[in-house]
Image (spheres, coloured by chain):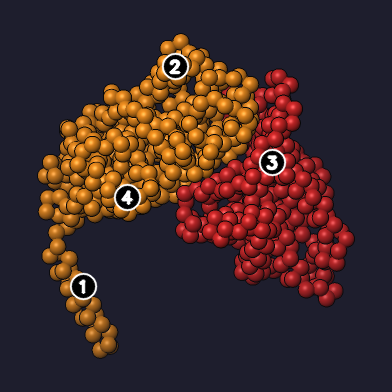
Amino acid sequence: MRRLLLSVVLAFVLISLGVAVYSAAPEPIIIGCNLEMTGQVAAYGQAAWEGINIAMQIVKPEALGRPVEFRLLDNKSDKIDTANASSRLIEKDNVSAIIGPMISGSMLSAGEVCEKKEVPIIGPTTTNPLTTQGKKYVFRACFIDPFQATIAATYCYRDLNAKTAAILSDISNDYCVALGNFFKQEFERLGGEIVSLTYCKAGDQDYSAQLTGIKNKNPDIIYIPNYYTEAALAVVQARDLGLKQPVFGADGIATEEFLAIGGKAVEGVMHTTFWHEKAAQSELSKKYVELYRQKYGADDEVNVFGALAADCYLIVLDAIKRAGSADPKAVALAIEDTKDLQVITGSVTIENGDAIKPVVFREVKNGKWDYKTMVNP
Amino acid sequence: MSLETFIQQLTNGVSLGSLYALIAIGYTMVYGILRLINFAHSDIFMVGAYFAFYLIAVFRLPWLLSAILAVALTACVGMTIDRVAYRPVRNAPRISALITAVGVSFFLENLGLVTVGARPKPFQRPELMAKVVRIGPAAISGVSIWVPILSIGLVIILLYVIYRTKLGMAMRSVATDIDTTRLMGVNVDTVISYTFAIGSALAAAGGIMWACKYPQINPLMGIYPGWKAFTAAVVGGIGNITGAMIGGFLIGLIEIMAVAMFPSLSGYRDGIIFGLLLVFLLVRPTGILGETLKEKV
């Protein structure tokens, strides 16, 4: 009995001590990170997390005199898991805002949850126009797909002089299907012809049947707006089958995995993306590139997905400061008001949830991404 | 479809089918002997590919040696899995073993995610496998020539082991009746251990060949090929090694031809194959070559 009493008293003392210490420090502001750490597009989520951590070295995670903390959840690149992760971040962790997911299909499901709970969510690279449409709490830090695909189609038609094109897109991802459609619309509007429109599915590894069909149609160019693994495997198999046409991709292939898996086969592949370190002009971008190189080696490509996620961190942090409160509703209003904010990839203005950003063209040369040009909106 | 395209598609189908066949053989062999659908087979396939990857990339061993070592190492992994996960439930109801197999499958996938990471790794293809040969109008990569040869060769060796050796006799005996076999003085656990070793070695061979054809590996790479091979095993008659071979080629050909004939439906190729699995399970559950079984898992 005495021992029981003693332990109860001891427990009380410890708890009250803990509470005392805890209440002395200001309560942290929590930002949720809902990222693809595993699954089909694990490279995006992992790069994003790296980017956020580097940005935290540049701009201290502090706002309103309170520390800012991150809660990272893995959404497994899955639509349902992404929605669940958002619910958990909102209900259990009381986050002020959520960064991620990286891909549009997942944002469509997570956005639904955040809209209902009135908590802002910002996707670093969720390019599909539908993700933010008609929503007050869903944002993005990148351009939208109609813009990227229109510019790609115009470039293929005018600069590469392609009159016929084939499209191979991933039917299980909203992003890929929509990009294929936008490309088709613009390419046909310009007077070109889509001779083959075929599909694959996330996780597919064999594309020989679709590519043989494309080979039979002999187009001037092949547009593959898929994620990196699928796109790399498709290009490798296209070259194995003897297809020599230039291949054009979208922002989804901007990972080192694409270059490593593709090897020699992806030489000359072009794509549209958000940013390139050579387009980095501001002090902030230079600092970011420097810190990235310090951490990941001098030869490493500075990952675009990481840079965009770092942008999101800066946008959210700035919004909390301007809102003067960590209340999700106030933060959402402040994000919408973002104007000419200096971030890693340049300056950003947000309108109707969308960031106004230029498109960058790159080409694979000697196993590296080579900067070609930049097109402003 | 022009003749040229048709021949190329046929080549594509045989090439994919032979890979499915290679995986399906191991699936079906373990089932034939233990009446256990080893769902972990597709993850052992992944483990084999990773062993080969690390032996080549980290230890810088020559390709062929790495492949052989990887197969041997994976066989050991298979035996370990049997010892740790399956032996304790050997006398439990069959459904327990099945659930254990699913558990092992998830365990291996997640262990892979934690240890090697979720991001895909580029698999280095040897020149022999990567080289593209042109036969008439068709372009065939080296791996597509070697895999059918390897698959058929392995089937012949496997049939020899099962029907012409003492170990094979013990295996067939275990397949018929475990208790009686034990009463006859056969060490049943050793026999089953060897069964898993052979099955896992086959899975590893499949994994390495798969990685040569589709040069990326990730911890979840086995899932879809595994399901397709499982379908092939069922279509061919699960438990029947020749059947698995035929089923594999058939599934590969159907998959490619479905996409070739209906390019607009190419996103649904998995649906077509799994639809076929359903049809077979409803209409002819014993498959093309399978014998009638009294009990099914």
Disc 4 crowd, CA 10 A, few/some/many (<14, 14-19, 20+): some
Residue B96 in picture, x, y percent from top left? 63, 62
What residue did someone put label 3 on?
B142
Pointers 4 and 3 within a single chain? no
- Nearer the observer, disc 4 or disc 1? 4
Taking depth in this image into account, of A7 and A184 the one nearest to the observer is: A184
Residue B122 in picture, x, y percent from top left? 53, 47
What residue did someone put label 2 on?
A157
Taking depth in this image into account, of B40 and B149 the one nearest to the observer is: B149
Asked if labels 1 and 3 touch by Cβ distance under 8 angstroms, the answer is no
What residue did someone put label 1 on?
A15
Q: Chain of mark 1?
A: A
| Residue A31 visible from this viewpoint | no
The residue type indicated by label 1 comes to: Ile
Instruction: Note the chain letter of the red one.
Output: B
Residue at 27% over, 48% down = A290
The residue type indicated by label 3 comes to: Gly
